[in-house]
Amino acid sequence: MSVDSVCHAGFHHGLRQPDQILTMRLGHCPPAIDWERFDAWLAEKLAIPIQRTVAGGASGHEATRLMGRILQVAAALQYAAHIPVFEPGRILSCDADPAQEGAWIFRVAVAQVDFMAADLTSLAYNTATTLVLEVAADLARFADPEALYRQLQEHLMQPLERALPAGKSSIHLLRTAHERGIPWRHLGHCVFLLGWGRHALRTRLGKVETDALLGAHAAQHKFMAAQWMRQMGLPAPEHRLVADEAGALGAAEQLGWPLVVKPADRDRGEGVTVDVGSDIELRRAFQHALGFSEQILVERPAPGVCHRVLVVRGRVLYTVRRQPVSVEGDGRRTVVECIRDANARRQSIPLWDRPPPYPSDAPACAALDRAGLTMSSIPAPGTWAPLRPIESTEWGGRDEDFSAALHADNAAIAIQAASLFGLDVAGVDIISPDITRPWHENGAVINEVNAAPSLGASQSSLETLPALMALLVAGDGRIPIEAVVGAGTAWHKARARQAHWAAQGRACYVTSHAATEDAGGNPMPLAVSGLFARCMALLMNRHVEALILLVQTDELLETGLPVDRLDRVERIPDEPVSLRSTHPLAAREATDRLHQFLLAAAKIEI
């Protein structure tokens, strides 16, 4: 397989993501493929439901049907590694290989993510090709896919994740944007741009750029955050910041037992020990926390359970009670049998999506003991046997939705806490014995305010992502973008369209490959050249409310469009565009071809 050289990630072939061209060769097709069983295997073992239209349907020849599945598997594996590839691509051509009978050469257009190395793209599609051919040839060999999972994890998923460690929050946000038709681009270093011009918003790992930097820094440090909240009259934990074991023991004398010991500046439950009830346990908990931070909190536990309240721009979107990892009883099986069966079910999940196994170790026995259970207990139907004292990223957990039951006073302090730290997206953790009752009646406290809450981690979070996106990005995040094709007098037409948008109160900018004018018609120097690069620069400019592209060269035939669609295309009659010296077409042919390309982008019949 080879990847055509591209200078920019542009839109060429009607995909909703920037695309690139791959040349792929199938040297052979396994005989007599049972497509129904093969597709069922992909759905069951890799969680990839096959779209028959992409895969060539029943009418396509074997090679086309295989290539359709290769494209879908490659896209799905990249997505599973948190690479934002949301569509499988398109087969552009399929030709018999003149060098070998039975071999086929395909040209395909597939999604290209900015700043992803070409060798990793090749790795994804070569891996998918090998996987599809081997499984199709001998399905029985992969009845137990565990060895395949481990091979894919080591040789594909981990390299992809290292190349773009965007994380789950980013992939869920981008998927929501894609489904809502909101344009996005990768700006590098896991920073993504949502929307264009005046609607543009940058985000990274669950953070949005409109979050206050100082507030996010303060929220990250639990001791400082509690000080801020107390000064605002919000309920906060009672704790002491200590630097050594002697300080921890002194804090215990002041606060009393039991205690919670945790790092002051870490998230996700890292380094936390609960139910500390003696000097020995305190020393052990202090050393455990010290492995994560030099700043340790010794804290009096608040009554109740932690509840995550997601606040987005002053609105509560959901509330979940965060329970520790547990197994559900059925009145027949012991706890250890429930653990065994639950782990067996998890083994069928692909390795990269598989949660940690349910534990049956000493901490699990201790958590059961606190609940009045043992490994030999038989929990009643519908009851849960806890295997850890609290929910954490390391151990996992389960969420119970309390969105409809959240008391208005508790919602109010969550919103106030997010506002205090200047966070547009905040995960406010309230420890309460009953979140349906006001915080001032039952001793509830705000335990933490998280500046980069995990998005899409629970069903409640997934279901509210469209509402979250609507609060972050206006409409579909787009601005009107038009193209005027032609040479000399095309500038007059472009300025006339600029005046049209100005009359509607929109700041409209105009750019060609060589010059850019702002909404007032003033020259706007830019440190980039070419129509593609100038358009990209303006899409990042929040002063831009509409944009006219003055197409005077055939550059876009090579780079592709910088946007996935145009709102309007107009051609100045009898004015061919100027040619780039490397392009072989004559002036009139180039203009005609370019015009047709732009009309297709505007979804106008040619």
Image: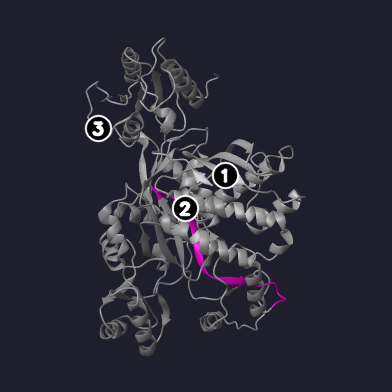
Point out residue 265 in the picture as x, y percentages from the top left corner. 31, 68
In the displayed structure, would residue 588 be above or below residue 362?
above
- Is residue 98 visible in the rendered image? The answer is yes
Name the image quarter holding the C terminus: top right
Mark 3 residue crowding within 10 angstroms, few (<14) / some (14–19) / many (20+): few
Q: Nearer the viewer, residue 424 or 39?
A: 39
Q: Amino acid at mark 3?
A: Leu
- Tell whether position 331 is magenta: yes
- Range of magenta residues: 312-333
Q: CA distance from mark 1 to mark 2?
A: 15 Å
Find numbered disc 1 in the image and state the secondary structure of the residue it sits on: strand
Q: Nearer the viewer, residue 422 or 501?
A: 501
Point out residue 347 in the picture as x, y percentages from the top left corner. 63, 68
Q: Which mark is residue 384?
A: none
Q: CA distance from mark 3 to mark 2?
A: 32 Å
For marks 1 and 2 on the same chain, the one whose residue lies earlier in the sequence: 1
For marks 3 and 2 on the same chain, the one whose residue lies earlier in the sequence: 2
Q: Residue at x 32, y 80 (%)?
A: 255
Q: Nearer the viewer, residue 383 or 411?
A: 383
Find numbered disc 2 in the image and state the secondary structure of the residue it sits on: helix
Q: Residue at x 42, y 31 (%)?
A: 558
User: Which residue was labeled with disc 3?
Assistant: 526
Q: Amino acid at mark 1?
A: Met
Q: Nearer the viewer, mark 1 or mark 2?
A: 1
- Tell whether position 135 is magenta: no
Side of 599 relative to 521 (left or right): right
